[in-house]
Image: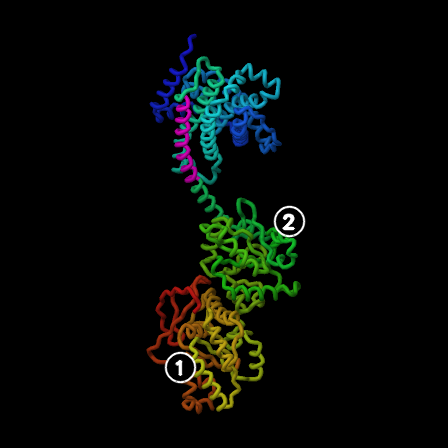
Amino acid sequence: MEMVPRKMQSRASRHIFSASDDTTMTKNVRATHAPDDRHVEVRPLLNVVQDIFLRVASLIPDIVKGKPVQMGAMKDSIQQSNLAEVLDISYHTINRISCEICCKCSSGDVHATTMGILNMLSGYSWDAKVVIALAAFAANFGEFWLVAQLYATNRLAKSVAKLKHIHETLEQVDDLGLKFETINNLLKVMLDVTNYIVEFHELPSQYIDPEAPEMLTASTLIPGAVYWTIRSTVSCASHLLGITGLIHGYMTTVVESWELSSLAHKLDNLNGHLRKQLTLCQLHLDDNKQREAFETLRLLFETPHQDNLKALKAMFCSNDNPLPLFDGSSKQRVNPEYIFSSHYLQILYVSIDVLRRKIVLLYISDLHNVPDQELVIFEQLYLESRQDSTRLESQYELVWIPVVDKAIPWTELKPKLEKLQSTMSWYSIYDPSVLEPATIRYIKEVWLFKAKPILVVLDPLGKVVNLNALPMMWIWGSLAYPFSSSKEEALWNKETWGLLLLADTIDQSLLYWMSEGKYICLYGGDDMDWIRKFTSTAHALAKALQLPLEMIYVGKSNPGKKVQEINNAIQGEKLSTVLPDLAIIWFFWVRLESMWHSKSQHSKTVEEDHIMHEVMRILTYDSGDPGWAVISQGTGTMAQGKGDTFLRCLNEHEQWIETAKDKGILPAMADYIQGLQTPHHCNRLILPGGSGGVPDRVVCAECGKTMEKFYMYRCCNE
């Protein structure tokens, strides 16, 4: 039979390529698709194909230049068991298609050859079709270059090369590299398309619905992508046989190179569409996966277990692997010279198994709203609990969970994380950037984490027994163990309002002064003129009435530079005792705020709860100007008021001194201050949000009217 000239075949092929109707072609391709029940895990086979193409690409430059090829050591990364299973199913099919490509590609009808191959692969899934066809071509392509590689050094290879005309091809080295560059470019795009098709079939079906719009769109693209990839293998094979002279009268021309380049362009365009759809499918899949993970967390924390590990592993899980914990205590026990050793890393990073069947306190915060003072007090309380391991109060573990913004590069967040970890003696998540979105969502939606830190308590069986134990931690310290809501309520049932609850142990002299029956005055504010007037007037009155008086300045909430300057001035002028450290001043105020939040968590209100009512008074004083004061003997009546009102009470002591002879000093002062309350007054209450919630309705502690709610945004402590 007379062979049609190659150039005429090429022009016909070009005409078919340019005029083909993709819709009709796709319909014909779908008609060949009749998959049976067989399932082929094609990834191992695709890895072999990619390995062949990659190694050939690295060999070609030296081979075409006649240079000896270096045979380096090769590590086989292919999973042989999986590959053997694939080959058992597809070995004969690969060989048949390999022969089909060799025999039919010289006919010139690339479309017919491609459809023939698709008919041979009708029983396979789309991903298996394209990978098997690519493997069939790779077998021929790899064999060609294997012989070419050994041609100069191996007699057997030399003889085989002569039979296959490879020796003549290698002797024409002038433009050989350019000829194969076009093929290599097309092979790269073919691999990209094939990988996308395989990735679509690897999407776990339990997380994505085949009828989802994203998948339906992908299903319309894949048959065409399979067709054009297989067609490209046929064209590459034809090009390769033409270069070696096995196709009679073949001469590589611009036309043939144009055909391969056009196929590469076609596949590259398909790549863009497949990439877009795969991204959409993965987003859809991730949403479903995270939704399931969220519901799993919800169920685990609501269901009794034998221990707490199941729930903790689900929370600290990334890609089904539990995240290790950073051991904050170990960093202080390891010598610096071991800091980069594997032994050191083993000490620092521990499994969450260390938390098994223990009370676990989850300290949750972001990286930017962790008060330094909070960490100082927290560290002190934690270390105190560890001094005696036999104490019941030491039987808990603390874990810091930083909630980070994944939109910020980890390189920017890591230094801040490591700085905070260096101040903590407890455990923390070593890499919070890989916490699952479902975990973050659960923390925010179910545990109500916003911006301010919270302390979630799990019992030894993994049950949540307190959504935020920070308030009770600040109020009672280790006495709050085991930090459950029921323990919190029991502690409140034992408390009464007084100086002991208000001031706790902020100053070591308090208990001594109380035992001696002294009058103790706590005062605050940031108006230095008022402080001078108030302290001098109070000391003068105490001297006149022969009252043993001690005064302590407790500053303002969120103390900063200004409070420190006032502290220094009071000490310098010897006006009164001061709290020596801003952290202690911060702790005094955070305890008051914690009392408010603790009571709120137990649905208490100002109207019905006396302690909450009195706490609100102090917080209201702090929100106003210029200052405030409280005087008590430790038990019984407490006289308290705003700065100007209290100062007026002291200056007008003649008005209430007679009443004091019957009622006592403090009750008389309290009544007089109450009488000075104007009908039209304005109290302000500033409560930090995000820590236990802020109630919608708050009544004034002075007059009982509902306070109007405003929003306040503050960025500094001054």
Q: What residue type is disc 2 on?
A: Ser
Mark 2 to mark 1 CA distance (whole Å): 66 Å
Q: Is residue 130 above or below residue 369?
A: above
Could you say whether the residue bearing mark 2 is in a helix, strand or loop? helix
Q: Which residues are magenta?
A: 256-281
Q: Which residue does the image show at 37% across and 65% down from the upper left?
A: 711
* Circles 2, 1 touching at the beta carbon (< 8 Å): no
Q: Is residue 639 left or right of residue 79?
A: left
Examine the rendering and report whether any part of residue 41 can be seen.
no
**Quadrant assignment for the N terminus:** top left
Could you tell me residue 253's position as x and y percent?
41, 20
Q: Which residue is mark 1?
A: 645
Q: Sequence-wise, which precedes: disc 2 or disc 1?
A: 2
Q: What residue type is disc 1 on?
A: Thr
Could you tell me residue 515's position as x and y percent?
58, 82
Name the mark on residue 342: 2
